[in-house]
Amino acid sequence: MPVRVQAEPFDFGAEAAAFAAGATSAGAVVTFLGVVRDDSGSLSRMEIEHYPGMTERALASIAAEATDRWHLLDALVIHRHGSLLPGEAIMMVATAARHRAEAFAAADFLMDYLKSRAPFWKKEFGADGAAWVAAKDSDEDALSRW
Amino acid sequence: MRLDVLYFAWVRERIGLPKEQVETEAATVAGLVAELVAREERYAAAFADITALRVALDQELAEFSAPLDGVREVAFFPPMTGG
């Protein structure tokens, strides 16, 4: 269950292909790519701060729980920090299971948990200055699904 | 006891530093917060609404009522926005 926290960009296609190639006994591989979104039309960049040490621990713990609950054959989480431009990839998850229901559910679970349980904070810089992205109540509520 | 206290995101910005060592006899996180708030206005500003904050003890999420016994690292931050 590799977990990577990095400032550098990653190649989503290459990561997905390598992950799928390594999951030899899987019947299903699900991938998700998170991208910097510009809702206002004036976003110049996003800064992602994180808590080195706790971030890796939290991601590994979330990935281990997903693997255990859905009997995953493999899981991958890559999350970037630092300065990102609109359209750039922020993070990806990949899950491999024998059947698609498990692979989809585990990917959904991973996304819900790393939104509000992995120590990342986003700050948006735009024409009107800078502002921290506020957590949404719906993000916390999403955890109760699991 | 001496603790490493870390601040992230707007908590870090309001207090004006990412990390400091704090000498405290506080029994709980809430007790430590009360000591910090009493120090200077910038701490009072950062901790004005504790329901808007989260705390981690030795890199695990915890409650403000949690004891500090045996803890080495305390981190304060707003709700996380990963993904």
Image: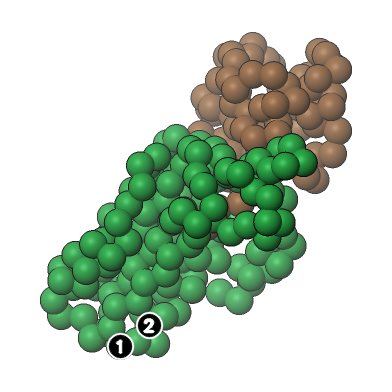
Chain colours: A green, B brown
Q: Nearer the viewer, residue A74 or B22?
A: A74
Task: Identify the image quadrant of residue A19.
Answer: bottom left
Query: A35 left or right of B32?
Result: left
| Chain letter behind tag 1 | A
Residue B45 percent coordinates (x, y):
84, 27
**Amino acid under label 2?**
Glu
Residue A105 percent coordinates (x, y):
45, 79
The residue shown at (61%, 51%) is: B81
Whether residue B42 is situated above or below residue A18 in the rendered picture: above
State which quarter of the image contains the N terminus of chain B: top right
**Amino acid under label 1?**
His
Please state the total of marks drawn on the protein image: 2
Residue A102 numbered tag:
2
Q: Nearer the viewer, residue A101 or A29?
A: A29
Secondary structure state at the residue bearing disc 1: loop
- Asked whether disc 2 touches disc 1, contact meaning CB atoms under 8 Å apart, the reply is yes
Q: CA distance from mark 2 to mark 1?
A: 6 Å
Query: A61 left or right of B34?
Result: left
Residue A88 percent coordinates (x, y):
46, 53
Whether residue B56 is situated above or below residue A63 in the rendered picture: above
- For disc 2, the neighbor class at 10 Å (few under 14, some 14 to 19, many from 20) is many
Residue B15 numbered tag:
none
> Is residue B64 visible to us here?
no
Secondary structure state at the residue bearing disc 2: helix
Q: Both on one chain, marks 2 and 1?
A: yes
Query: A52 left or right of A11?
Result: right
Which residue is label 1 attached to? A99
Residue A43 percent coordinates (x, y):
64, 48
